[in-house]
Image (tube, helix red, strand yellow):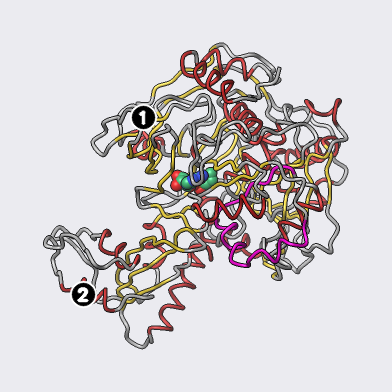
Amino acid sequence: MSDRIHTLSGYFHEYQKSVTEPEQFWARVADSFHWKKRWDKVLEWDFEGPDVKWFVNGKLNITENILERHLFIMGDRPAIIWEPNDPEEEGRTLTYKQLYHAVCQFSNALKSKGIGKGDKVIIYMPMVPEAAVAMLACARIGAVHSVVFAGFSSNALSDRINDCEAKAVLTSDGNFRGSKKIAVKAVVDEALEKTSTVESVIVYQRTKQEVTMKEGRDYWWHDVIDGQPDTNEAEVMDSEDMLFILYTSGSTGKPKGVVHTTGGYMVYTKYSFENVFQYSPGDVYWCTADIGWITGHSYIVYGPLLAGATSIMFEGVPTYPDAGRFWAVVDKYQVNQFYTAPTAIRALEAHGTGPIEPYKLDSLKVLGSVGEPINEEAWHWYHTHIGKNRCPIVDTWWQTETGGIMVSPLAGVTPTKPAYATLPLPGVQLAIVDPEGKVLKGNSVEGNLCIKFPWPGMIRTTYGDHERCKQTYFSTYKGMYFTGDGVKRDHDGYYRILGRVDDVINVSGHRMGTAEVENAINEHPKVIESAVVGYPHEVKGQGIYAYVICDMKNRTEENLKGEIKDTISKIIGPIAKPDKIQIVPGLPKTRSGKIMRRILRKVAEGSMDNMGDTSTLLDPGVVEEIIKGRVE
Ligand code: PRX
């Protein structure tokens, strides 16, 4: 039975059912999957704990629902189409049958290295099909994967390895990105100097660059699969067994490991994929994200493959060899659904329409947007020049913690409105609250976005620190999950996401904690104190503006700024480098020592006309100094 919604009245009907009878609703959706043992109870929950269980005591393996399920009727259909960085290099296609064998073989290889149920495995790999094979092989044997974006530094990698006490790392020799060849294994080697739990490293050969292989620890991918059988008995997993950990930034401290479990995540990613994108069998779907982020997990790998879709995996960047690359790929594979981030749209928009002209783009049916608010101008450009005024845009709001899309039009079903994520998916019960926690009813209201009822794809805990999960998401507003986003519900009842209301910034769709960037800056020996804020950036959505107090002895400003950027690259990765650094004599602090970020944000934005009340500042004079030295 299909759970595809086809009409707007159908959507309202389903939504209503999902609210009045959530257990029956999700049981019906879940019944279309293969369970080794059906669940005893659909849902047990308590947001105080928080303690949420979906499909209680159900037994399954998610990879059987991807592989065995599609093997016999459509084993020859492409599961993954891989487009390499260099358009001259030949791509690869893995059919469902080939994917099945590749996953089974690699599962056996992992087992031969002593990796089994419950073990944590870090995946630090470029966008090659083997990265998806690696994720699925972990899921097949019950190991918990934690994918780390291959642009993160060795420090960021070792922090994550240590936090989850990973037993193995799956990686590659190097990575092709645009015109660059980037070392990957060397970063792993450096990270492993600061960790003690990793017993084996498996290295996929991609760039054929020189690497050092440590005897007894490091193995080539092609060697470990050699001779392994290409079938494998899938491990029996409980619905609530951990499927993966994915680290993400918050407003305080180090990135936290968001934990997703097996049954609910499976049900939610497939259901949301099919409905939002209105995927029909035979369509070719392309999400341009990296598997290092949740979008890659849920909508390159799990959602599409659970639905038996053909999912494109792209190794390169949108501007290599030129700014028409996305459109060349769309025409080459006749892509039907295309899903990308506003920052990519704005970056391509800056190149004008010239790079689009050689391409037809007539296969496109649906366009998607994710990761940050899409401004109206970018929305219209996308709609007109890429969608040729014919393709609905699904502006999908969700988070690493939600596992899947929460607020979005269903393509061709929900009437769209530029910059609006529109309406919640069935099963998603939103609440807008004011700062005091009062729920704002009715339309034309604005406040903080909360979710008041569990959904199957939701976060279960933050790895190794349940209290942090409770504090971060379930304590601000009693009995509700707090998203950290501001939102408006307009006169039609449509939702528009306004951006983060906490100290998280969103740079080119990458989520970063200001505290995390400050901690990295403070590692520089000449830095005394720093404060980081976001400011509106034409292409990136938000840029990073850093105010730094430094000991200037033996340094020029320029030297110091360069060194600070290098420090951040080393500690987090190049994506966290500030766009602007201002060396300041002091920071605007209250008498109790709290930095008044509001003032710093105003200066960074360039709106200095009304600085508001500065009378509580210890030294109001510092504000003038900061305004004087503002970086344009
Ligand atoms: O602020 C929201 C923004 O991205 C945050 C979640 O980031 P992350 O966990 O990295 O996941 C990104 C991909 C799902 C949210 O709290 N965000 C995501 N999608 C949208 C968005 N803001 C506005 N509109 C969106 N469509």
The residue beneath circle 2 is 624
Amino acid at dot 1: Met
Judge by depth and name the residue closer to the eye, 44 or 333: 333
Q: Which image quadrant is residue 482 in?
A: top left
Q: Which mark is residue 480?
A: 1
SS at mark 2 in the image: helix
Judge by depth and name the residue closer to the eye, 244 or 431: 431
SS at mark 1 in the image: loop
Q: Which mark is residue 23?
A: none
Judge by depth and name the residue closer to the eye, 423 or 543: 423
Q: Is residue 147 visible?
A: yes
Crowd rating for badge 2 (residues with CA inside 10 Å; few <14, some 14–19, many 20+) = few
Judge by depth and name the residue closer to the eye, 242 or 290: 290
> What's the magenta region?
336-359
Q: Is residue 164 visible?
A: no
Rendering coords of residue 114 (x, y %): 70, 40
